[in-house]
Amino acid sequence: MLVLLAGGCAEESSQSPSEGATADSSPAIDPVEAEAVIDAYRTWRRIQDEVLTGQRDIEDVQTELDAVVTGQAVDDLQESMDLYTQHGVVVQGRSSISPEVTAMNLDGVPPTAILTDCLDTSNTDIVDAETGESRKVSSEVQSERVVVTAQAEKTSDGRWAISEVTTDFDRSC
């Protein structure tokens, strides 16, 4: 049975992205910085959707991707694309997201933020690229709404970039 999530297929990790972040030095989350983190995440998610639906090749989005993604998150998208290609599937439809910055350390080197999202893939389908036959795992086997945790780092030029993404397929939202 092929287990693919329409929003991507990053594997669940035993170490969450927040384990790499240092403790927040203040309880407040800067709303301007938080919005910049969310913007980077939304852009990464949009690019991922465009690549996994077959609308764009990963090579065509590289410059745009480099502006909002760094580290492991770059490799994860390439691995997702390779897996989809290997299995001859594409995504139809669009996933919905509802990201929220849940922690931020602006004093860290580099500054970091943790974002939590509820990825909703109920309006998507994984289909055979040639036949259009559905290959999506039943929602009885895998929830269509799963918790995603992302870590972002502020780059030396002041941009926020998503550095790690963990999808917890065992936690629905």
Image (cartoon, grey):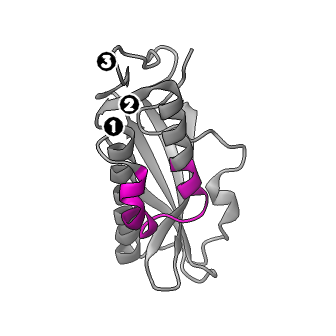
Dominant SS of magenta comes to helix
Residue range corresponding to the magenta coloring: 58-77
Q: Which residue is mark 1?
A: 53
Q: CA distance from mark 2 to mark 3?
A: 9 Å
Q: Residue 129 versus residue 172: which sits nearer the camera?
A: 129
Magenta span contains residue 72:
yes
Q: Is residue 77 above or below residue 172?
A: below
Q: Amino acid at mark 2?
A: Val
Mark 2–mark 1 contact, CB under 8 Å?
A: yes
Tell me the residue at 50%/45% (across/down): 148
Is 66 on the left-hand or right-hand side of 56? right
Q: Quadrant of the C terminus?
A: top left
The mark nearer the N terminus, 2 or 3, is: 2
Element on which disc 2 rests:
strand
Q: Amino acid at mark 3?
A: Gly
Point out residue 127 in the picture as x, y percentages from the top left corner: 37, 22
Element on which disc 3 rests:
loop
Q: Residue 165 versus residue 34: which sits nearer the camera?
A: 165
Q: Which residue is mark 3?
A: 132
Q: Amino acid at mark 1?
A: Thr
Tell me the residue at 54%/34% (across/down): 83
As drawn, the label of residue 90 is: 2
